[in-house]
């Protein structure tokens, strides 16, 4: 029988779990100190925790519900991990170095059903959601990698943008956030966490209502329904009109800025026309919108798409700036390894099937 990850319980859930078993809730703080401050890697390493408590935890939970399967390191310091889960599935996690700190991109699902036609993540359909513990464990594995190298290095930022649609695994994703932001745990500031969605409008509203001060990014990639439906099939079910209403609700409810992710595809969505349409789409909310222009990492299976010419990227950027839309061209990471999300996983599965 596969055990659940010890990292899957929020502080409140762990306190309640212990209380149900006759252990006073204050022991939860001792357990979390061992997990997230001391960062022990087994129950036998736990010190200062009631023996009965450790025994109960060890019978139900595991420290390792995944194993490192492949690790790729880039010249720019980016590290891509391919983890194998207990059921044999593979997921990706990426560590990126920035001037402001160390950021980790986590995966929330095994595969993806959103079906963006340019994305490597959707090459393999979703088989299941990850548990909250499996998402937290990705962060812990990266932190342990850093601990081995330099005890002073800490994961400082998190982006929930790996394989899968985070809002399609909403409850586990919210539990994950509550674990990593808790002051008795990793204590990563909520404003240093960004969650990305392809546009699940009702979940955007629900996310706004949580009261979490977590950043939201919308993967838009096209400024009109015809083009967006062509490259992102989700737009057929949730077109721009209800999506923009949800964006308005999020901005009004939270008073927070939203990031718009826009991958530039050569001769598809990178013309002056699309730049003007994008500016029109957000003209009435330009103070609360930040556009992230993303150079495309080509995927073999999606050969119809190519990276935009540099001149087109700059022209697109200039058009938005002239229309007073805050934007930037995203810095690339890991271009000398399998940089596109889902690419390493897809290649590894093909390789193992061929053997």
Image: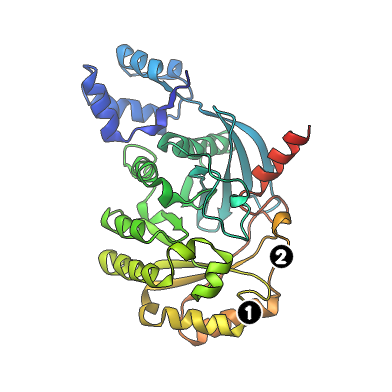
Can residue 37 be spotted in the picture?
A: no
Q: Residue furthest front?
A: 236
User: As drawn, is 267 to the left or to the right of 226?
Assistant: right
Whether residue 351 is visible here, answered yes or no, is yes
Q: Tag 2: Cα neighbours inside 10 Å, few (<14), some, or many (≥20)?
A: few
Residue at 63% across / 79% down in the picture?
Answer: 314
Up-down relation of residue 213 to residue 68 (above or below): below
Q: Secondary structure at mark 2?
A: loop
Query: Residue 249 lies in what quarter of the image?
Result: bottom left
In-front residue for pair 134/200: 200
Give coordinates of residue 159: x percent, y percent: 48, 52
Q: Residue at x 56, y 73 (%)?
A: 227
Left or right, 275 with reference to 190: right
Rendering quarter of residue 201: bottom left
Q: Earlier in the sequence, mark 1 or mark 2?
A: 2
Q: CA distance from mark 1 to mark 2?
A: 22 Å
Q: How many marks overall? A: 2
* Quadrant housing the C terminus: top right
Quarter assignment of residue 255:
bottom left
Residue at 57 percent of width and 59 percent of height: 116
Q: Position of residue 193 (x, y in %)?
A: 42, 53
Residue 324, how many percent across, how many down?
Answer: 45, 84
- Mark identifier at residue 35: none
User: Badge 1 local density, few (<14 within 10 Å), some, or many (20+)?
Assistant: few
Residue 304, label in figure: 2
**For the residues carrying marks 1 and 2, which lies nearer the camera in this image?**
2
Q: Nearer the viewer, residue 89 or 227?
A: 227
Residue indicated by mark 1: 314
Q: Secondary structure at mark 1?
A: helix
Residue extending furthest right? 355
């Amino acid at each position: 029988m596969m055990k659940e990850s010890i990292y899957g319980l929020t502080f409140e859930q762990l306190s309640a779990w212990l209380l149900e078993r006759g252990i006073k809730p204050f022991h939860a703080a001792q357990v979390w100190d061992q997990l997230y401050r001391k960062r022990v890697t087994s129950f036998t390493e736990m010190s200062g925790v009631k023996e009965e408590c450790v025994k109960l935890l060890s019978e139900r939970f595991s420290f390792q519900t995944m194993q490192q399967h492949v690790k790729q390191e880039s010249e720019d310091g980016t590290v891509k991990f391919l983890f194998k889960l207990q059921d044999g599935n593979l997921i990706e996690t990426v560590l990126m170095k920035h001037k402001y700190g160390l950021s980790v991109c986590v995966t929330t699902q095994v595969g993806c059903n959103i079906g963006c036609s340019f994305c490597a993540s959707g090459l393999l359909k979703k088989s299941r959601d990850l548990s909250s513990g499996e998402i937290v464990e990705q962060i812990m594995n990266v932190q342990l990698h850093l601990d081995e190298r330099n005890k002073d290095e800490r994961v400082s930022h998190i982006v929930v943008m790996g394989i899968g649609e985070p809002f399609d695994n909403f409850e586990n994703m919210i539990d994950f956030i509550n674990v990593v932001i808790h002051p008795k745990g990793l204590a990563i500031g909520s404003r240093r966490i960004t969650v990305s969605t392809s546009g699940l409008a009702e979940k955007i509203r629900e996310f706004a209502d949580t009261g979490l001060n977590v950043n939201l990014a919308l993967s838009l990639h096209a400024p009109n329904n015809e083009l967006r439906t062509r490259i992102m099939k989700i737009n057929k079910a949730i077109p721009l009109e209800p999506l923009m209403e949800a964006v308005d609700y999020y901005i009004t409810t939270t008073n927070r800025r939203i990031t718009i992710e826009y991958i530039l595809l050569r001769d598809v969505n990178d013309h002056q026309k699309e730049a003007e349409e994008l500016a029109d789409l957000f003209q009435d909310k330009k103070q609360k919108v930040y556009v992230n222009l993303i150079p495309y990492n080509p995927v073999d299976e999606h050969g119809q798409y190519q990276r935009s010419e540099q001149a087109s990227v700059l022209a697109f950027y200039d058009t938005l700036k002239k229309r007073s839309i805050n934007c930037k061209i995203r810095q690339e990471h890991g271009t000398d390894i399998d940089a596109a999300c889902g690419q390493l996983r897809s290649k590894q599965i093909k390789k193992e099937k061929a053997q």
